[in-house]
Image (spheres, rainbow, N blue to C red):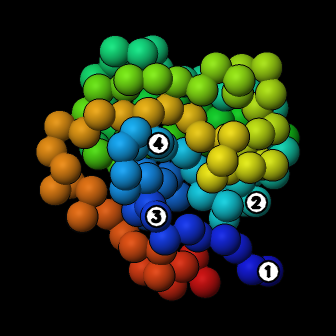
Amino acid sequence: MSFDFPTDRRYRESHEYLTTDAPHRVGISDFAQDELGDVVFVELPSEGDRLSAGDSFGVVESIKAVSDVYAPVSGEVTAINEELFDAPELLNDAPYDDGWMLELDPDDESEIEELMTADEYAEQVE
């Protein structure tokens, strides 16, 4: 199976992405949504919450599993995608577009460079 990993974002080993341009959106990769199967519930932090890189910020529940999702970098949550509460399947249908989870204002932009590029991430999930 072939997955899509857009090059305008960086990736964590735990399958979250962060867009490289502001607003920095966070979500789960195409690979992650495929592994999870049909997403039925999403739990997200609140706007204004502070996240530390690598800390769990929410939960994605699918018909197969319940999985924590992790902050790619440290920063403040500036927006959440409230559409996911009524339509969690957006994570499956459009993980890089309408299925984004939150927007984050990074404390240190250099942390973004420490995440994997699309090519590095693609190698990891092969």
Q: Which mark, residue 1?
A: 1
Q: 2 or 60: which is nearer to us?
A: 2
User: In the rendered view, does 51 fall on the left or right side of 62?
Assistant: left
Q: Which mark, residue 34?
A: 2
- The answer to which quarter of the image holds residue 106 is top left
Q: Is residue 83 above or below residue 10?
A: above
Query: Disc 4 designates what residue?
Result: 25
Earlier residue among tags 2 and 4: 4
**Quadrant containing the N terminus in the rendered view:** bottom right
Earlier residue among tags 1 and 3: 1
Whether label 2 touches label 4, CB < 8 Å: no
Query: Mark 1 is on which residue type?
Result: Met
Query: Marks 3 and 2, Cα distance to the nearest angstrom?
Result: 20 Å
Earlier residue among tags 4 and 1: 1
Residue 100 position, x and y percent, is: 59, 40
Question: Which secondary structure lies at badge 4?
Answer: strand
Residue shown at 46% from the left, 64% from the top: 8
Residue 101 position, x and y percent, is: 56, 35
Query: Disc 3 designates what residue?
Result: 8
Query: Marks 4 and 3, Cα distance to the nearest angstrom?
Result: 11 Å
- The answer to which quarter of the image holds residue 112 is bottom left
Earlier residue among tags 4 and 3: 3
User: In the rendered view, does 102 fall on the left or right side of 85?
Assistant: left
Earlier residue among tags 1 and 2: 1
Q: Nearer the viewer, mark 2 or mark 4?
A: 4
